[in-house]
């Protein structure tokens, strides 16, 4: 099971990243757990300076932008 973490305070971009990440995981047929990390101190522990960010299994894959679904699929496979 993949652990997807959305790092961000809940802004519209964070919500869009959540939607795209869920869509990518579903299209790949993955079992996943989605966690939203909104605490700024927790986000900083990942070394992220710009949100939103996507972490897969604890590793930050992208930050500061909202990648398209196809791009997220690459991070998940």
Image (tube, helix red, strand yellow):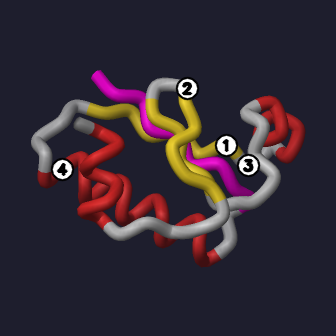
Q: Are marks 3 and 1 in contact (CB under 8 Å)?
A: yes
Measured in 3D between alpha carbons, the distance from the residue under mark 4 to the one under mark 2, in whole angstroms, is 20 Å
Q: Residue furthest right?
A: 41
**Quarter location, residue 52:** bottom right
For the point 88% across and 38% down, the residue is 41
Residue at disc 3, secondary structure: loop
Residue placed under numbered mark 4 in the picture:
26
Residue placed under numbered mark 1 in the picture:
37
Disc number lying in front (4 or 2): 2
Residue at disc 2, secondary structure: loop
Vertical comparison of 28 with 11: above or below = above
Judged left or right of residue 60, residue 27 is left
* Range drawn in magenta: 1-9
Q: Are marks 1 and 4 in contact (CB under 8 Å)?
A: no
- Checking the image for residue 38, the label placed there is 3
Residue placed under numbered mark 2 in the picture:
58
Measured in 3D between alpha carbons, the distance from the residue under mark 3 to the one under mark 4, in whole angstroms, is 23 Å
Crowd class of label 2 (few under 14; some 14 to 19; many from 20; radius 10 Å): few
For the point 83% across and 39% down, the residue is 44
Measured in 3D between alpha carbons, the distance from the residue under mark 1 to the one under mark 4, in whole angstroms, is 21 Å
């Amino acid at each position: 099971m993949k652990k997807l973490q959305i790092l961000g305070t809940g802004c519209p971009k964070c919500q869009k990243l959540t939607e795209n990440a869920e869509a990518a995981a579903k299209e790949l047929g993955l079992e996943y757990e989605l966690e939203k990390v909104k605490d700024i101190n927790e986000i900083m522990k990942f070394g992220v300076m710009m949100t939103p960010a996507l972490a897969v299994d604890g590793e930050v894959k992208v930050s500061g932008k909202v990648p398209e679904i196809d791009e997220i699929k690459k991070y998940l496979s």
